[in-house]
């Protein structure tokens, strides 16, 4: 059963907002690099992934970081990991 | 009797506003215990008391702004008998208007000051969230016990605010922080003759070691490269201890431990560099946990007084922003600042051949009254070598002290 992309997006944005409270959900363009739209340092990024892990149970190894440039990349990745179960 | 005075929580601090007492006359206190919350231009700081005793009298009331050095409370030492009748606590502070002297004190809406002496209690989690959101927690209606402001109250206020104008308290704090930073940095450049050195550091070994280590642990235990950098600086300082300490009243004072001031950029602007204590002796995993906690509290505006006053050297890492190197401004009374730029794959000669390798530029800004370029160079060379041997950085609790 494939997870609903919309609910994944909502979750991802909620986690992002807990790290960057100044963010409005509509601010993020899913196809543009996240780092260009939100001020995230390496600690923030790690906290973002920890948040996703806690909410969705998905572990994202460091080797996969390079794939996750845009929000769409993140959602595609999450769907693949969750759908494959 | 001992006088407990308002400590200086940074070179740029001249006064602070007492927000809240956590103790009252009669309470026993222990060294290191947080006894009050004081607002500075940068954060609401949890002030720790430095010795054991019993509170005899509180001299400053919540809402009052006082200069650094003002006696906040009087304590009885352990074993000291109570003489005669205890002094009555300073009388009903009928709306004690905070002495708004210098422009440094952030403006708080008058409505909350005319409230009773006991300021509306705000739960710690509510205070943190309010700071994150730029909301003045004390001005909110409280739904908790005895009118206390809870996390739910803060979230409700945030939801109502939505796209409205930025809370005035947040803007005032921003301005106050900028002024504080301006004062400290101007003083630094006026008084400290800076010299600057930089060194390119190959990072392949360190990053490979880190990736392998991180693969084997849960995500919550991953260590960031920044932690390796902090540890490497602390160990490199054993070679040149004169970069770790304070210059005051015309003399340099070596610090026994390395308490690294970690430069943390605050969302929306501003900078603090609170101390991560004993970087040289703690294991990497502990440093990572403490760094994460420090960053979170710095951004929530909730730091401890020892974190504000204890840094013996400052470390700044702008690598995440993609800059190649950073030449910083030393934060007085410290005498050095180490900067780390981004890791980038660049051409490098290894074993007589040109290769594409991950490299980083580390820089040192140092006080020429205390050290010369030669010593600075020895430090950077040692830093470079340490980052080629990540296993040395990982060796748990390093207890050897080789300070001259």
Image: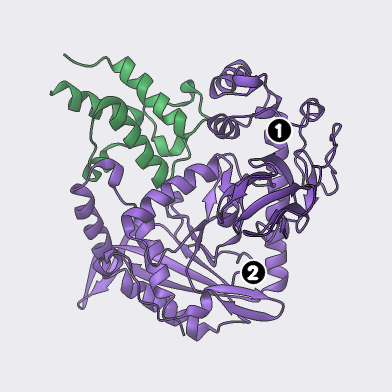
Depicted A26 relative to depicted B87: above or below:
above
Chain bearing mark 1: B
Determine whether, in the image, residue B5 is placed left or right of residue B378: right
Residue at x-position 65% and y-position 76%: B193
Given residues B388 and B345, the one toward you in this image is B388
Q: Secondary structure at mark 1?
A: helix
Residue B382 in sight = yes
Residue at x-position 72% and y-position 43%: B18
| View extreme (left): residue | A85
User: Tag 2 or tag 1, which sits nearer the N-term?
Assistant: 1
Cα separation between marks 1 and 2 = 30 Å
Q: Which residue is mark 2?
A: B333
Q: Position of residue B398 (x, y in %)?
A: 33, 70
Q: Secondary structure at mark 2?
A: loop
Q: Quadrant of residue B161?
A: top right
Chain corresponding to purple in the figure: B
Q: Position of residue B95 (x, y in %)?
A: 85, 32
């Amino acid at each position: 059963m494939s997870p609903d992309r919309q609910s994944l997006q909502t979750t991802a944005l909620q986690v992002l907002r807990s790290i960057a409270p100044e963010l409005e959900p509509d601010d993020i363009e899913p196809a543009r690099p996240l780092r260009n739209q939100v001020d995230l340092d390496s600690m923030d990024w790690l906290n973002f992934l920890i948040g996703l892990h806690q909410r969705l149970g998905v572990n994202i190894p460091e080797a996969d970081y390079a794939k996750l440039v845009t929000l769409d990349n993140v959602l595609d990745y999450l769907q693949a990991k969750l759908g494959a179960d | 009797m001992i006088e407990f005075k308002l400590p200086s929580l940074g070179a740029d601090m001249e006064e602070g506003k007492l927000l809240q007492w956590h103790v009252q006359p009669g309470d026993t206190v222990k060294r290191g215990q947080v006894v009050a919350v004081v607002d500075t231009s940068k954060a609401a700081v949890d002030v720790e008391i430095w010795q054991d005793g019993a509170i005899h009298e509180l001299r400053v009331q919540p809402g009052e702004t006082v200069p650094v050095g003002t006696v906040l409370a009087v304590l009885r030492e352990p074993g000291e008998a109570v003489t005669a009748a205890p002094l009555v606590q300073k009388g009903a502070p009928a709306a004690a208007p905070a002495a708004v002297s210098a422009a440094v004190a952030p403006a708080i809406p008058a409505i909350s000051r005319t409230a009773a002496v006991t300021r509306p209690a705000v739960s710690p989690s509510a205070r943190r969230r309010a700071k994150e959101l730029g909301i003045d927690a004390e001005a909110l209606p409280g739904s908790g016990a005895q009118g206390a402001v809870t996390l739910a109250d803060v979230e409700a206020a945030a939801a109502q605010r939505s796209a409205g104008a930025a809370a005035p308290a947040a803007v005032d704090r921003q301005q106050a922080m900028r002024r504080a930073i301006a004062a400290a940095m101007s003083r630094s450049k006026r008084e400290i003759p800076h010299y600057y050195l930089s060194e390119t550091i190959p990072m392949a070994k360190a990053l490979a070691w880190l990736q392998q280590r991180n693969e084997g642990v849960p995500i919550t235990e991953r260590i960031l490269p920044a932690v390796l950098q902090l540890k490497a600086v602390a160990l490199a300082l054993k070679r040149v201890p004169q970069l770790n300490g304070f210059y005051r009243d015309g003399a340099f004072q070596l610090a026994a431990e390395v308490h690294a001031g970690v430069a943390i950029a605050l969302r929306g602007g501003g900078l603090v560099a609170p101390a991560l204590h004993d970087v040289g002796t703690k294991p990497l995993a502990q440093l990572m946990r403490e760094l994460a906690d420090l960053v979170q509290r710095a951004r929530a505006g909730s730091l401890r007084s020892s974190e504000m006053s204890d840094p013996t050297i400052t470390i700044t890492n702008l690598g995440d922003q993609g800059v190649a190197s950073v030449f910083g401004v030393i934060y007085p009374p410290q005498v050095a600042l180490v900067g780390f730029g981004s890791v980038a794959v660049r051409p490098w000669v290894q074993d007589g051949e040109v290769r594409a390798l991950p490299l980083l530029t580390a820089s040192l800004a140092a006080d020429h009254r205390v050290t010369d370029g030669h010593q600075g160079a020895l430090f950077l060379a040692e830093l470079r070598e340490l980052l080629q041997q990540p296993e040395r950085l990982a060796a748990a609790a390093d207890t050897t002290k080789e300070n001259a």
